[in-house]
Amino acid sequence: MKRLWFIAIPLILIVGGALLILNMLQPALPDPTGQHLVGYQRTHVQQGDRWADVQIFYPATEKTDQQPKAMPKTLAAQMAKSFGMPEAAMQDDRPLPAYIGAKAVAGAHPVLMFNHGHGMYANQNSHQVIELASHGYVVIAISHPGHSLVSYKGDKAVFKAEDIANYAPGEAEILLARQAEGYDQLREAATMDEWTAAMAALETDAFGEISGQFQDWIDNNTLLLDQLPALQSGTVPTTVAGALNLDKIGYFGHSFGGAVATHMNMQDDRVSASYSLDGPAFTWSIADAPNGAFCFAYGNANNQAGIKSDMSWVNQQIAKSTKGCELVFDGAAHMNFSDLNEISFLKFFGMLGPIDHQVMRNGLNQSLVEFFNSTLRNEGEMTEVEGTTFVQHDLKG
């Protein structure tokens, strides 16, 4: 009997440890707080040779017997490749709380576009996307063929190109160090001219490669905006035909996608509001007199590759000039602004900051709902949420 226990105890510890690690790698699934169920549909939009993969989340009246998976096998394989992890550890077949093909709630709902971070994927912020849909927004998450980890045109999968978000040994560290220096300079800028000079230098030194990819993303988003009337009319068949309010369009995005959100709000009159999640703004995006509402959320505890950086207030001059809002999530790192926030194990690798993941998630969800309610629905106003420092620049100014 003693010999059996000698074998069994280590085995129990090994199995228990493996289950604990697996549990830590599987993030909490979204638990939306809005009054609506959430429907889901995936399709693509196209003009000429240009196309974009879109996933639509929307307020729904009913459940169906099909739900999208949190991390399906094909996407998991690409995530594993990017992060150097085993594919089995990334795959997550649990169903998201969204229902494929569900009937949309009647009425015209504000439309929100979501753009993911550079080299990532459209559902990387499922908690925020599903939360907003449960509060009555139609949220369209876009995948960029060749830039996103996986994009679909029908059943055909297109994967991220090898030269996208792929850095030689040591190169990432050099770029991250220059970004950290640049963020300090942007934060210290006292005028818009000083901000522009600091950002122009940063674009050349640290964002040169990805800056060249920016126009592709803008063209894909312009295509999507152009195709919204076809979605509304049903010319492009979806379950949200007739349910879109095309006079109420907002944008949000993470990192590079946050820069896209700011750009679209600055440069396209069809967009009324944008919320950037720890994203820069580029000099070529800035308009002289933009009409939209702007908000910028930042983390101050990034520590990628051992290089610390603080993005707080880096877009302050833009926020001031547009009478926008800013939030700093104290203790948040860059990837806390995505679903990776839910995998607390990643704190040990410097990918997440010390902020509590539930405080981060709840605060981000609350601020997004409040921002778009106030700007697109004229309901309520932004408030300071737990774990943040909040500034609303003078609206009377």
Image: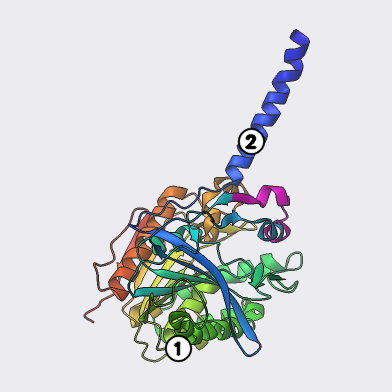
19 within the magenta span: no
Quarter of the figure that contains the C terminus: bottom left
Q: Dot 2: few (<14), some (14–19), or many (≥20) neighbours within 10 Å?
A: few
The x and y percentages for residue 248 are 35, 79
Query: For mark 2, what is the residue?
Result: 19
Viewer-closest of 388 and 24: 24
Q: Where is residue 172, by image quadrant?
A: bottom right
Query: For mark 1, what is the residue?
Result: 267
Viewer-closest of 206 and 43: 43
Q: Amino acid at mark 1?
A: Gln
Q: In this orientation, does residue 195 appear? A: no
Sooner in the amino-acid sequence: mark 1 or mark 2: 2
Which span of residues is magenta-colored? 78-93
Residues at marks 1 and 2, CA–CA distance in whole angstroms: 49 Å
Q: Amino acid at mark 2?
A: Leu
Q: Residue at x 53, y 61 (%)?
A: 334
